Amino acid sequence: MNPRVVGANLVVSLKSFYRAKPAMFFTIAFPILLILVFGALFMNQDNMSFDLYVQDLDHTDSSAQLVKTLELEGKFKVIRIEPAVNAAQYTRDYKSSLVLTIPEGYEGSFLQRTELNDPDASVTLTYLYDLSSSLVFIKIQILNSVFSGINQKMSGEPPFIRSAETSMLAGKYRFIEFFVPGIIAMSVMILSLFGTVHLNTELRQKGVIRKLSTTPITRTDWILSNILYQFILAVLSTTAMLLVSYAVFSVSLQINAWVPVFMLLDVFAFVGIGMIITHFTKEAESAAAAANAISFPMMFLSGSFFPLEMMPGFMQTFARILPLYYVNEGFRASMIFGDHMAALRHSAMIGVFAAVVFILGIIATQWEEDQ
Amino acid sequence: MTKKAEHAIEVENLTKRYGDLLAVNDLSFNVIKGKIFALLGPNGAGKTTTVEIIDTIRKPTSGKVTLFGMDVTKKKHDIVHRIGVLPQGFSSFDRITVRETLQYYSRLFSCANTDIDGLIELVNLKDKTREQYKNLSGGLKQRLGVAIALVNDPEVLFLDEPTTGLDPRSRHEVWNLLLGLKEKGKTVFLTTHYMEEAEFLADTVAIISKGKIIAMGSPGALIERNANYLVLTLRSVDEKVFDIVREMGFEPVHDNHKDVRVRVERMDDVQKILNTIQEGGASLLSLDVRRPNLEDVYLKLTGEALHKEPAGGAAQ
């Protein structure tokens, strides 16, 4: 390995990157845009409220009080429907996912229970809902919880089982804190994988690598300078993402020694995969397609965007064989939880994977022409 | 011993196969130090494969190639410091300027004393030093390629079709550059499919066809040996001229401009033909008599090779 040669190659790569303004913009801007869009979408997740359509057929003080209770809960923005309206038709016409109907005689039953202590007095509220809406079950869950609270209060007996909520984290963490480490892991993967594939196939197609093979630069020098180049890009991109996240969303993420460690392992793993792809695909277009085929499923299945708990069981099992999963989890363990043992465990997993694919990548990288 | 020391390159029974395709078939030749050697042949003849084996880009299937007595398959690291290569279809980093490109290659060779300005001047790129590679014309790119091949002050220069795609003026500039390098004592190994390029530049020309050398020698010797005749070209609007010449027992052909071209052994034959045309009442617009060139040699040799076994012994 010749440091002078590695340095010369690195300088050429960085100058080429700096002078390709659109490429430079998108390398840094794309992950930032993702953070801004998703961050804005989920920033107020805790204060989210849903539209709730209520048809009060009873039209009494008691039924009005019930509607007010639902409004005060804070989870619903109540929209009242006239009693004369056909609720089913209204649901279809106005694309409302759920209509709550308070039946006639609500107040009578209510007074019978509260004033006369009649245990048999009850009322049935109707949920008219559209199953195709993804939000309908969340709304029903919240309604059930509100009504069970009212029932509990009316029974006058203290609950047997209570729950106490204590966060395992020191501070309050939001979706954005979960999201940013995943986007960092994903961006470094894309930079390293596509950067390697593009650089190698383009230069090979243009004959630059053939020319380089007649100079003293060795395969090791070339690969090492590529690793350094991708790592520098990863540092630039990660710094930009973190600055935006701190400035716009005031994220509570720790920056510790694990961050560069996971960035480096991310770079090694996906530069290695990029080198292997380059060996098997001769044209830049087919190499890019192969890189897409690898990176796209990894992006969505390894928990970069969404928690694994949201996925079916077999997908969660599948996610655990994806290298990006360990980078995601490693970043989160260190940046969110400050859990060094978990970070060590994940770094060991991705480290072994990176070492294997990187060695295979070195073997697969050809310097001399054989065809 | 002394004779061997004069050879910069020695090729013995070189063969290269790509699966079933025999690209290079048992080539043997030497290149003398300080001379220009041209490998001449059509596309697909095996020129690039041969030069890429010698300049260490490819590995041979069998045979031995030595540069300065070093086996190219075993001493690549030592050899690359002593050679300069302009591969076929040379390209470089798009967004790197002319000067930066030369500095980059100079660093690869760890050459602290490369005269970058001298190289830029040599290839006449002085007003393009800040231009990025992607903005250069084909001719300028090729000249930069030659300059890159010279950054390590090589003893042998390999140029694979250095003037392909260049306009006549750029081509002549490259030719003059190569003649200048020869004067400085560099050995130049050149591949080309331009006959006039090989004839103008080369001390030794090897004509390659279907992976085999079918003739080798100085351009003059090749012409003398293989094309000992004169070429008479007759331009006329009278179609009788072609028939008159044929009836005299010659074998006239129409060339691209519909002129009548005929091979004759001696100048006396030219006079006879002119007299007969005059007697036949036909008129001529112009005539041209010239010695044959390498193109004529090549056509003659490959024409034979198409119908007969290639003259393998010619290379020896």
Image: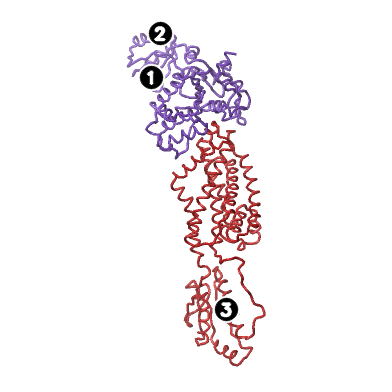
The one nearer the camera, A367 or A184, is: A184
Of circles 2 and 1, which is in front? 2
Measuring from the top left, give residue A184's x and y in whole percent: 54, 54
Q: Are marks 1 and 3 on the same chain?
A: no
Which residue is label 1 attached to? B259
The one nearer the camera, B135 or B42, is: B135
Mark drawn on residue B267: 2
Type of residue at label 3? Val
Mark drawn on residue A146: 3
In the rendered image, the quadrant that contains the C terminus of chain A is: top right
Position of residue B163 relative to residue A275, above or below, is above
- Describe the element under mark 1 as helix, strand or loop: loop
Host chain of mark 3 = A
Query: Of the residues under marks 2 and 1, which one precedes in the sequence?
Result: 1
The one nearer the camera, A84 or B107, is: B107
Relative to B104, A356 lies left or right: right
In the rendered image, the quadrant that contains the N terminus of chain A is: top right
Q: Residue at x 60, y 93 (%)?
A: A116
Chain shown purple: that is B
Type of residue at label 2? Met
Instruction: Answer with the quarter of the image where residue A150 lies.
Output: bottom right
- Marks 2/1: CA–CA distance: 19 Å
Work out which residue is located at the far bottom of the displayed protein and give it.
A116
Measuring from the top left, give residue A320's x and y in whole percent: 65, 56
- Describe the element under mark 2 as helix, strand or loop: helix
Chain shown red: that is A
Type of residue at label 1? Asp
Measuring from the top left, give residue B109's x and y in whole percent: 52, 31
Relative to B63, B215 lies left or right: left
Host chain of mark 1 = B
Position of residue A15 relative to residue A54, above or below, is above
Q: Are marks 2 and 1 on the same chain?
A: yes
